[in-house]
Amino acid sequence: MTAASSDSGSARLVVLVSGSGSNLQALLDACADPEYGAQVVAVGADREGIAGLDRAAAAGVPTFVHKVKSYAERADWDRALTESVAAYKPDLVISAGFLKLVGDDFLAEFGDRYINTHNALLPAFPGIHGPRDALEYGVKVAGATLFFVDGGVDTGPIIAQVVVPVEDDDTEETLTERIKEVERRQLVEWVGRLVRDGWTITGRKVRLK
């Protein structure tokens, strides 16, 4: 499986959000530099009235919303989301705190260019409680993983990882906040590298071109 950035001009990013949009804001800020090589062309969400949509509006970026409960079947929601994202012809689709699992149609269209970030060092501690599970297990290092999304839960090919030491007095909240800081920097760095250099996915190996 192979994918790469646009042959000319800035790469096109569609970002999916469910909440405050802090990762989205970091990407918007990075894209303000022409040398970053990308632009956010649309922001999608699974709910209305969230700060992430406000951030997009403030930046003049088009938005769309697809709420799961608005559709009779989950597959209908997935098809609608896929169509909306595809309309913007993205080179890369980014889950930036998007709290919904996409389905078969979405992955068939974007599986080799849909990335997500997780607050643990995968394959350890997948799911929604990565820092908590890491602390309970007693690990000495935690961290964040950037990966291409597949049909599993946090199981796709890994793009990059960053380590965060676990302190003796860490709580779930303090560890989560320290991970968020490096997670955001990793996301911005590697989105830029992917769109500027292109990438290949061979089995579970992701390499820059």
Image (cartoon, grey):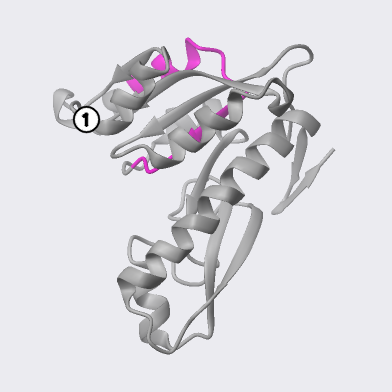
Instruction: Give the residue at mark 1.
Output: 47
Q: Quadrant of the N terminus?
A: top right
Q: What residue is rendered at 79% in x and 15% in y?
A: 7
Q: Nearer the viewer, residue 69 or 11?
A: 11
Whether residue 96 is in magenta: the answer is: yes
Note whether residue 131 is visible: yes
The percent position of residue 206, horizontal first and vertical second, equals: 73, 48
Magenta region: which residues?
Answer: 80-98
The percent position of residue 88, horizontal first and vertical second, equals: 50, 12
Give the quadrant of residue 134. Answer: bottom left
The percent position of residue 87, horizontal first and vertical second, equals: 47, 10
Give the quadrant of residue 100. Answer: top left
Query: Relative to 146, does residue 84 appear above or below in the rendering?
Result: above
Q: Quadrant of the C terminus?
A: top right
Q: Nearer the viewer, residue 159 or 183?
A: 183
Give the quadrant of residue 96. Answer: top left
Q: What residue is rendered at 26% in x and 23% in y?
A: 66
Question: Disc 1 on helix, strand or loop?
Answer: loop
Note whether residue 119 is visible: no
Q: Amino acid at mark 1?
A: Arg
Query: Relative to 206, does residue 102 appear above or below in the rendering?
Result: above
Whether residue 38 is in magenta: the answer is: no
Number of other residues with Cα within 10 Å of mark 1, as a class: few under 14, some 14 to 19, many 20 or more: some
